[in-house]
Image (spheres, rainbow, N blue to C red):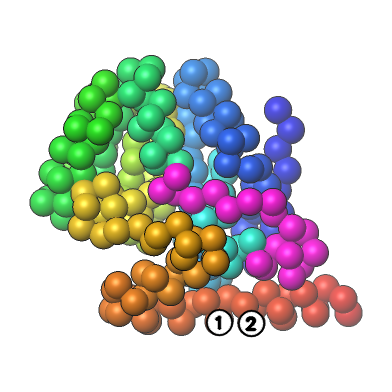
């Protein structure tokens, strides 16, 4: 299977469309290949640009998918267009649908305890045949290794890690060597949508490419995080014009 990548501010994004990406993930699950997936938006790219250790963690992933219209826009600005946005939420839902059909083992890590509880209840209600072998909220001591040991013992096919950026990617990178197989993917706020504590933007907002604005309206406290968007655009423009010199 040919895999093409486009680099944006040093981060290699895979250029597959959603269905192609899902075919690739399914192949990794069925062949028991351990796989680290980062769902990167402009905020993640800017954090990686400012933090060398985090940059190396993102680069160490098997696949970085373009979760955010800003990434698609940047690829077009650099004249290396990525064909389609591939969101962590869409991957999460499709993995749950497939797990419901195929009995794959899923582990849910992250969120506040009540959010994790609600997300697990939602999964079991909407996808009754998903084999949810384990779960843990996101507030735990990284150093004692108990959560990683539990995952190692349970050997899930899919580990949904919702610890927020950059903690989820750092946690995966820190522990992935101890696991034999599985898809390890940072899914951020997807756990809040599953739990029902946050609603995803309506389709019309998504179609207009302003899902970010909907989230800002619903969660005004996100405004500081949104500052990464104009900063990201400026960095992409710098890269574009420096490449022409």
Residue located beneath label 1 in the image:
230
* Residues at marks 2 and 1, CA–CA distance in whole angstroms: 6 Å
Q: Looking at this view, is 112 or 142 the one in front?
A: 112
Q: Secondary structure at mark 2?
A: helix
Q: Looking at this view, is 59 or 20 the one in front?
A: 20
Seen in the picture, residue 101 relative to 224 is either above or below; the reply is: above
Q: Which residues are magenta?
A: 73-90
Q: Is 86 included in the stretch rendered in magenta?
A: yes
Residue at the (26%, 21%) spot, across then down: 129
Q: Is 43 included in the stretch rendered in magenta?
A: no
Residue at the (80%, 79%) spot, across then down: 241
C-beta proximity under 8 Å, tags 2 and 1? yes
Residue at the (77%, 74%) spot, across then down: 240
Residue 200 seen from this side: yes
Q: Position of residue 225 (x, y in %)?
A: 40, 76
Q: Position of residue 110 (x, y in %)?
A: 24, 49
Residue 163 seen from this side: no
């Amino acid at each position: 299977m040919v895999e093409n990548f486009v680099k944006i501010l040093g981060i290699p994004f895979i250029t597959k469309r959603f269905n192609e990406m899902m075919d690739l993930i399914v192949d990794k699950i069925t062949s028991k290949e351990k796989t680290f997936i980062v769902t990167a938006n402009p905020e993640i790219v800017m954090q990686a640009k400012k933090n060398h250790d985090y940059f190396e963690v993102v680069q160490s992933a098997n696949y970085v998918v373009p979760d955010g219209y800003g990434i698609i826009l940047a690829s077009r600005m650099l004249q290396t267009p990525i064909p389609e946005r591939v969101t962590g939420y869409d991957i999460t839902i499709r993995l749950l649908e497939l797990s419901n059909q195929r009995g794959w083992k899923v582990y849910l890590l992250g969120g506040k305890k009540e959010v994790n509880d609600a997300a697990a209840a939602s999964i079991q209600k909407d996808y009754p045949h998903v084999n949810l072998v384990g779960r843990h909220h996101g507030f735990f001591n990284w150093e004692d290794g108990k959560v990683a040991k539990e995952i190692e013992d349970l050997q899930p096919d899919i580990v949904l890690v919702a610890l927020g950026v950059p903690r989820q990617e750092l946690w995966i990178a820190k522990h992935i060597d101890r696991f034999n197989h599985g898809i390890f993917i940072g899914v951020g706020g997807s756990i809040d949508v599953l739990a029902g504590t946050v609603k995803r933007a309506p389709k019309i907002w998504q179609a207009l490419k302003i899902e970010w604005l909907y989230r800002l309206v619903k969660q005004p406290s996100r405004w500081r995080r949104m500052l990464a968007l104009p900063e990201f655009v400026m960095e992409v423009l710098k890269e574009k014009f420096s490449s022409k010199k």
